Image (spheres, grey):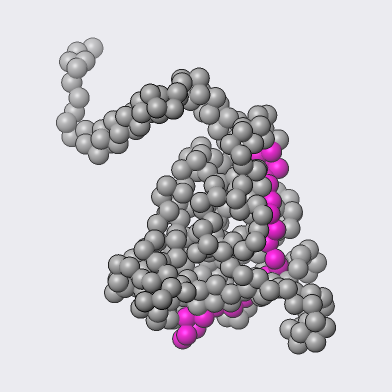
Amino acid sequence: MTTTTDPSYVDPVLINPRAIRLVNAFKDALARMRDEEGLTFDDLNAAADLLQKVQAATGAPLALVAMPLFSEVFQGGQDGYTPSEDVNSPTYIAGSPRIDNPGVLPMRPDEPGTPLVVSGRILDGHGRPLQGAKLDIYHAANNGNYSALYDDGVPTYNLRGQLFTDADGRYTFTTITPVAYADPHIMDVDGVVEAVAALGRSLYRPAHIHYEVHHPNLITPWRGEIYFKGDPVIPVDFVGGTLAPPALQADTVLHEDPKDIAAAGFQGPYRTTEFDFVLKTRTSPDTVAPKGATA
């Protein structure tokens, strides 16, 4: 038996006014780009084709592959607070082990790289420490690979760990100094190098450490990356130069004095860096003075 329905009927229960509004706004934006910047359908096809190739090469969801195009649009935590990324990194994996504070990120006995001692504090908008804040920390190895993303024999939680801040909101951990890297799976995709170069960008990402910060008093968890001042890759970052504003760049100090090296327990030169996060809690003011600013 065939049931005949009105082909023009749309169940009103299924209509989503917000979805309609967003789709129309997106089309309006495309129309403005067509009229003001000369956007063509071929342009959209070329971009979509390249994203699909990268998605096939990396296995990452298409939305994450496209993230370099839009992630900086959703960057939050302004008004004097440490800028955050309100998107999840495709390099994050859950369940990393807890380490002491001070502690050492899990790493191989022969982990290549220069030792790095990282420290700082988690503060609210009043400058008060957040005790017991959980930091989920991770970064790439010296070859640019993140553990657990590819079957390269590296332990699952290599250079990944969690720690909790002390009564002063302080955290300290030892790892190896990150380096700039390019994903070889992306570099092998036909047309990617040329497309990125056409935008004046490099396929390399500047050295950085990923953090997620969780605390019951935070309005939202903080997610993002901390970079290092003076890194020449920052202005041509594949993801976008605006993702590494000065507020997300930490100073590093190289220690080469044999006495310093011996006192720190290392076998050779090492680096130190310090970075304070200023995060908005439920009782924080809407705006805070940027670090170093005068009232």
Q: Determine whether, in the image, residue 20 is placed left or right of residue 182.
A: left
Question: Is residue 57 among the parts visible in the rendering?
Answer: no
Which residue is painted at 54% across and 40% down in the image? 65
Question: Nearest the camera: 236 or 93?
Answer: 236
Q: In this view, does 163 lie to the left or right of 139?
A: left
**Magenta-span inclusion, residue 107:** no
Give the quarter of the image for residue 101. Answer: bottom right
Q: Which residue is pictured at 65% across the width and 52% down the height?
A: 233
Q: Quadrant of the N terminus?
A: top left
- Report whether residue 102 is seen: yes
Magenta segment, which residues?
164-187
Res. 250 image quadrant: bottom right
- 215 over 237 or under it: above or below: below
Percent from the top left, x then y, of residue 50?
58, 30
Residue at the spot x=40%, y=61% of the render? 77
Tell me where residue 30 appears, x and y as whole percent.
38, 28
Residue at 61% from the left image edge and 33% from the top image edge: 198
Task: Check if residue 178 falls in the magenta segment.
Answer: yes
Q: Which of 254 and 183 is in front in this view?
A: 254
Q: Position of residue 182 (x, y in %)?
A: 68, 47
When the figure is inspected, residue 32 is found, relative to residue 118, above or below; the finding is above
Horizontally, residue 18 falls left or right of residue 37, namely left
Residue in front for this viewpoint, 155 or 253? 253
